Amino acid sequence: MQSSPAAVSPGIEAFIRELPKVELHVHLEGSMQPATLLDLAAKHRVTSVPDSLEGVRDWYEFRDFPHFIEVYLTSLETLCDEEDFARLTADVAARLAAQNVRYAELHVSLYAHLMRGIPAGVVFEGIEHARREAEREHGIRMRWVPDFPGDYGVETGEQTLDAVLKDGPASVIGFGVGSVEVSRAPFADLFARARAAGLHSLPHAGENGGPERIREALDLLGAERIGHGIDCMRDPALVDRLRETGVPLDVCPTSNLCTGAIERIERHPLPRMLRAGLTVSLNSDDPPMFGTDLLNEYRVAHRLGLGAAELTDLARNGVVASYLDGSVERALLAEIDEVLERWSGQ
Ligand code: HPA
Ligand code: ZN
């Protein structure tokens, strides 16, 4: 199901736009606009994707999570050369900056490119070129989190990490695992190697695979943040642990609706997670595939019952959970507080 934009009052809309934001859970390739997909498909004569905007819209109606992953991986076939990766990154950066996103940590589906015979160097050259340009042009900072599909097995993870350690630039700050959620146990040694190389452990866990996946991520992968993690709400002891340790969760409400992880947006656990004292940030995951963006996720959060102060908490949590430098982090937190103060005084 595609989501339609959530409507909020003009006052809250202005507040959400004014709030300086970070995105900690967004997939670079899952941020490709339909028009870009069509252009790249035409450029490379890729016939596995639809050839019209209406076709793409229908294609993005996901039956369930595995179907979403299938469509996601097929859409990646349109990314072939350095210029494609640079173009995608430039577009994604401009759209984030236009939402007043100051900093983003983007997952890059590196293994999905390696398995198609595209060298890691091609991917990194393209995205790095555009990242540097975007920082100059829009002032937005971006960092990378290469990942691999867990259901493809540990060897794919090993190949991905090898490629990162050989060709990855300094702007790679983490390592992740995604796709259909399988046990995280086989990836313990792999993530130990990533952490030893200075990469942060940023796995998806508990998106739809149950609380046990989150425990594995914490105990076996040394997870420093949990991608999604909404299934923790099925396990009170795990909620206590996450609150006590302060491990942040990157929550993506519209994604959860569109992939079938939740049945109705009204039932999304975000408000309960926040009020349980969890360090929750708000994120868009694969925005055009779900008919959303980060501004819209803040509107959705508001419609779930969160007022300006709680939206500010989500924005602050994102900054605190990010890998921004300390001085930039402090300045951004001060700016966020100023926006809330101004808004509260109106
Ligand atoms: N979950 C897991 N893997 C993914 C996702 C997601 O939301 N998006 C792209 N790969
Ligand atoms: Zn994700």
Image (cartoon, rainbow, N blue to C red):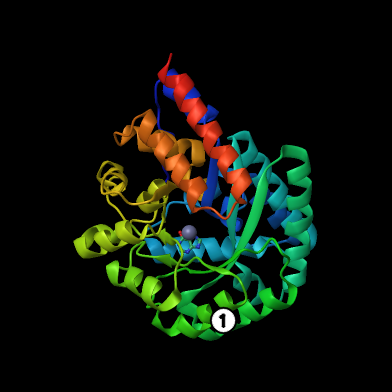
Q: Where is residue 155 in the image (x, y as percent from the top left)?
A: 55, 86
Q: Is residue 219 visible?
A: yes
Foreground pick, 143 / 87: 143
Q: Residue at x 45, y 26 (%)?
A: 340
120 in relation to 17, above or below: below
Q: In which quarter of the image is residue 47?
A: bottom right
92 with respect to 248 (left or right): right
> Label 1, on which residue?
193
Q: Which residue is drawn at 62% across and 82% down?
A: 159
Q: Which residue is drawn at 61% across and 55% down?
A: 28
Q: Within 10 Å of the Cα at label 1, are there few (<14), some (14-19), or many (20+) other Cα atoms?
A: some
Ligand 1 within 8 Å, label 1 CB: no
149 in relation to 290, above or below: below
197 with respect to 313 (left or right): right
147 with respect to 240 (left or right): right
Image quadrant in which the C terminus is located: top left
The amino acid at mark 1 is Arg
